[in-house]
């Protein structure tokens, strides 16, 4: 299904989609790094209180709206005539990466609630490893959209 009325707005939709993705990715890169630093602090300290504020604001004011906007503009793009050739296989890879990125976002949101309650169970090392996840997903998505290997 495509909506012909979206065709004249393709460039704007694509630009807004990319801006949303960039903002979302910035948060996905930064929030796990905040968690690394958070795990290094003593519970109840002034630093922990500051990290809780930073993590909440990053997630609620930047990451959540950016994710919603990225999804919204992405859906508008796939409804725009000529944007997606559904016979090609690359979009399956992009969708897989996008679902992975969304699941990672949700995991970070769950972890933020645990940090807010001083109930984090993950180590600094596990957060350092988690910090690499968005990079791998970004690589997958960009290759699928730009190179379209299949």
Image (tube, rainbow, N blue to C red):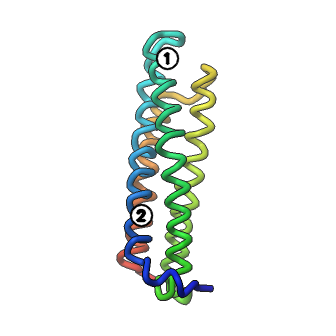
Q: Which residue is mark 1?
A: 49
* Mark seen at residue 77: none
Q: Nearer the viewer, residue 11 or 100?
A: 11
Above or below: residue 46 compared with residue 121: above
Q: Nearer the viewer, residue 113 or 124?
A: 113
Q: Quadrant of residue 146?
A: bottom left
Rounded to the nearest angstrom, the CA distance separating label 1 from label 2 is 34 Å
Locate residue 112 relative to residue 24 in the image: left or right: right
Number of marks in the image?
Answer: 2
What secondary structure is found at the residue carrying circle 2? helix
Q: Residue at x 44, y 64 (%)?
A: 17
Q: Position of residue 80 (x, y in %)?
A: 51, 81
Q: Position of residue 122 (x, y in %)?
A: 56, 30
| Disc nearest the viewer among 1 and 2 | 2
Quadrant in which the N terminus appears: bottom right
What secondary structure is found at the residue carrying circle 1? helix
Q: Which residue is mark 2?
A: 16
Q: Quadrant of residue 29?
A: top left
Q: Residue at x 38, y 71 (%)?
A: 143
């Amino acid at each position: 299904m495509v909506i012909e009325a979206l065709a004249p707005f393709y460039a704007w939709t694509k630009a807004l989609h990319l801006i949303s993705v960039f903002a979302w990715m910035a948060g996905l890169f930064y929030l796990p790094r905040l968690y690394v630093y958070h795990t290094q602090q003593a519970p109840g300290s002034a630093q922990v209180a500051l990290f809780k504020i930073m993590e909440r604001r990053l997630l609620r004011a930047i990451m959540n709206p950016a994710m919603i906007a990225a999804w919204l503009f992405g859906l508008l793009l796939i409804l725009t005539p000529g944007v997606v050739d559904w016979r090609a296989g690359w979009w399956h890879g992009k969708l897989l990466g996008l679902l992975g990125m969304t699941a990672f976002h949700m995991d970070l949101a769950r972890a933020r609630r645990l940090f807010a309650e001083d109930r984090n169970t993950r180590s600094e090392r596990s957060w350092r490893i988690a910090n690499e996840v968005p990079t791998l997903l970004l690589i997958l998505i960009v290759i699928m959209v730009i190179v379209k290997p299949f």
